[in-house]
Image (tube, coloured by chain):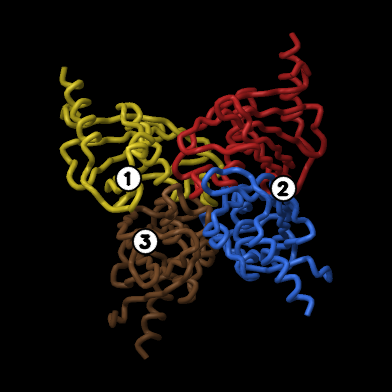
Chain colours: A red, B brown, C yellow, D blue
């Protein structure tokens, strides 16, 4: 975690009745919602809220996602969602990694890969300069 | 049901794992999804698919909804969703009524009230003439 | 709000991408999830967490719900959910009222009515004494 | 697809308003729901409905899932969900592969890996004999 290019952020989210299925644990599809919450709050924390990305005319749809279950979360559990963003991995796409813990124990990890697309035509484009500049600025600030 | 102004349609939908909560029954919020399926298929059946409403520049957001539970639906049950539309009740708003059955027994009924709004400015407007004309045509055709 | 029998609690919840539909506003069915969050946090605040209700062998399914829309909530809005519980309205059922605000303006209000049922046989029962005693204790404490 | 050990099944599902987000396309988390529909209908088609798995005292939670997006699905699109089950890949876990098409074009593919667990204690177990026998029987019947 000493890598200066690595940004991380932790956010908490409580499991609701709406989230669990008849096994009494969080339904599998809902973890992508928790991943969304994790990366949204990381981006907000570092000064690039996702709403700003949209204001600039871009969207960030998923092009790949992976989820690995090590355990399960029950109703009313508080999930600790750790999101990681490695600026070294910025290519034509960007990637976020996630670890979800309950009581300090990892129950799920995974990642999502996103492409920037123009909101007006849904065409994939390279990460725009406003985004790259902001990330560079954040990394520099961390160094000092 | 002999009222010529009354349109009705029945559609089926299977309960998925994603829909049930830890009580083993459909989570309450999901019934509004089943109401959506009911009115969408009624509109399609009578020749006014909702996608056509949007193409004409309108949206149909809910302004009121009521749900009454008489029973519950379990995983893998097939819901029989009956949707009713009474053209006499077209005012500044329109209304759909719903009955959801499992094995012939009503488990939920309710209604939704909708306003037409312009898609470009989200302003409420009266039901547009393309909609009123189409409904009139459907009612007439039923008479013959 | 001077009625001693009236309990109220405010909780906040941010609108996620998962919550909005193609109109760009919260999908109608998701408001029942926000109502759940409201009453769950009210119950927790006053010392009767819903998980305790289940531990005592009871469930609290909805038997009626109503939602009225006055406006809409957009992506990334923070909802202010006010939940009200009037202990005078405890009968064979209990009722919660809700007001959801964005930037101080009510966009949705509504209510849910619940029945206590035994978890083992799903039979409706009167509000159990552990619940009634706790509510009475809360009301008394407010008086002092 | 000539591999006798490979079972496949196609099922259709229409995209609802509840499924799309403000990009106007299906929200990413909902694809795991479509995967669920795919494998459930494959299992039902081949005579091992998931409800039967639960009746035998087992659950089939996900332990891994991957989704790759090639395109997107819009409101009211009909998804063609192809699910594949390769009986040669039965180990301590089982795996389903999925391809989702709109108008004949693949928009999403992916897989899920599941472990059998005992419903009473949530402990992972080997695929039970009732399941293995049934699969063997299906494969044999295909040969003839």
**Few, some or many C-alpha atoms within 10 Å of disc 2 (few <14, some 14-19, many ≥20)?**
many
Nearer to us in this view, D4 or C17: D4
Task: Verify CB contact (< 8 Å) between mark 2 and mark 3.
Answer: no
**Few, some or many C-alpha atoms within 10 Å of disc 1 (few <14, some 14-19, many ≥20)?**
many
**In the orientation shown, which residue stands out farthest toward the bottom?**
B144
**Label 2, label 3: how far apart the Cα atoms are:** 47 Å
Is D5 situated above or below C47?
below
**In the orientation shown, which residue stands out farthest toward the front?**
D129
Q: Is residue C39 left or right of residue D36?
A: left
Could you say where residue A109 lies in the image, as x and y percent from the top left?
67, 35
Could you say where residue C138 lies in the image, as x and y percent from the top left?
22, 26
Q: Are marks 2 and 1 on the same chain?
A: no
Residue that carries the numbered disc 3 in the rendered image: B126
Residue that carries the numbered disc 1 in the rendered image: C60
Could you say where residue D108 lies in the image, as x and y percent from the top left?
72, 55
Residue D66's disc number = 2
């Amino acid at each position: 975690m000493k890598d200066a290019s690595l940004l991380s952020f932790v956010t908490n989210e409580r499991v609701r009745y709406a989230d669990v299925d008849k096994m009494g644990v969080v339904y599998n599809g809902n973890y992508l919602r928790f991943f969304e919450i994790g990366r949204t709050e990381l981006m907000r924390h570092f000064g690039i809220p996702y709403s700003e990305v949209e204001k600039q005319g871009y969207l960030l749809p998923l092009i790949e996602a992976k989820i690995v279950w090590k355990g399960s979360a029950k109703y009313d559990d508080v999930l600790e969602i750790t999101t990681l963003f490695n600026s070294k991995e910025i290519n034509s796409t960007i990637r976020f990694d996630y670890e979800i813990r309950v009581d300090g124990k990892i129950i799920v990890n995974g990642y999502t890969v996103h492409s920037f697309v123009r909101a007006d035509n849904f065409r994939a484009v390279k990460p725009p300069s406003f985004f790259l500049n902001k990330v560079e600025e954040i990394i520099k600030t961390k160094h000092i």
